[in-house]
Image (cartoon, rainbow, N blue to C red):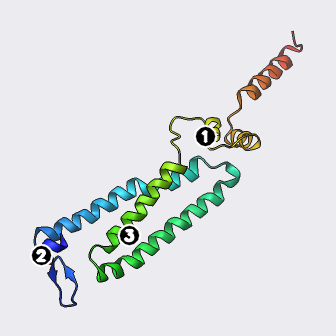
Amino acid sequence: MYAAYGETLPSGSVGLTSGPPKYVAITSIYVVVAAFASTWAIVGKLYTAEIIPNRYRARACALQQWVNWTINFVVALTAPYFLSQTACGPYFMYGGLTLVAAIVLAKWMPETKGLGLERIAEVFGIVGEETEMMTVATGRETPGEGAERRRRAAIERRGSAA
């Protein structure tokens, strides 16, 4: 769009100064921000809040927030400089970083929709003590544990094992 409709500004850079292309560019920015805010921006928060075991959850959420704010700061800091140097450079760089994020998502963040905490632990390769901690921390009982507890409660009510 800059190549077809851009005009040279007094500073020597190319910009969209009037007409429909300017409004298309502005609208596109809002659409990208809305799409990012409703998809990618929330993925890290959901993963750390829902999947990480309780004993690591606070640290993981803090790290996720720090990374999110740091990346947003770097983008806000570098975008004006990149745009002043080249009209398309930031789009290729940020697009490349989004491609890397998509690869990370596909490789290391498996789908967990509809899975219980025990099954999620299996998907991530967590076994033994961590799985038990997840079930105790969330108040859910493992199948064997619940049956044994109910059996003991029934014995206490009846007064015998018969």
Q: Earlier in the sequence, mark 2 or mark 3?
A: 2
Residue furthest left as drawn: 19
Choose the circle earlier in sequence order: 2 or 1. Answer: 2
Horizontally, is 151 left or right of 13 in the view?
Answer: right
Q: Secondary structure at mark 3?
A: helix
Say which mark, if any, is on residue 85: none
Disc 2 target residue: 18
The amino acid pointed to by label 3 is Met
Three-letter amino acid code at disc 1? Val
Residue 135 falls left or right of residue 51:
right
Q: Position of residue 143 (x, y in %)?
A: 71, 27
Q: Who is closer to the viewer here, 77 or 50?
A: 77
Q: Is residue 48 above or below residue 124?
A: below
Q: Locate the N terminus and report the quarter of the image it occupies.
A: bottom left
View extreme (top): residue: 162
Circle 1 sits on which residue? 123
Q: Residue at x 75, y 40 (%)?
A: 128
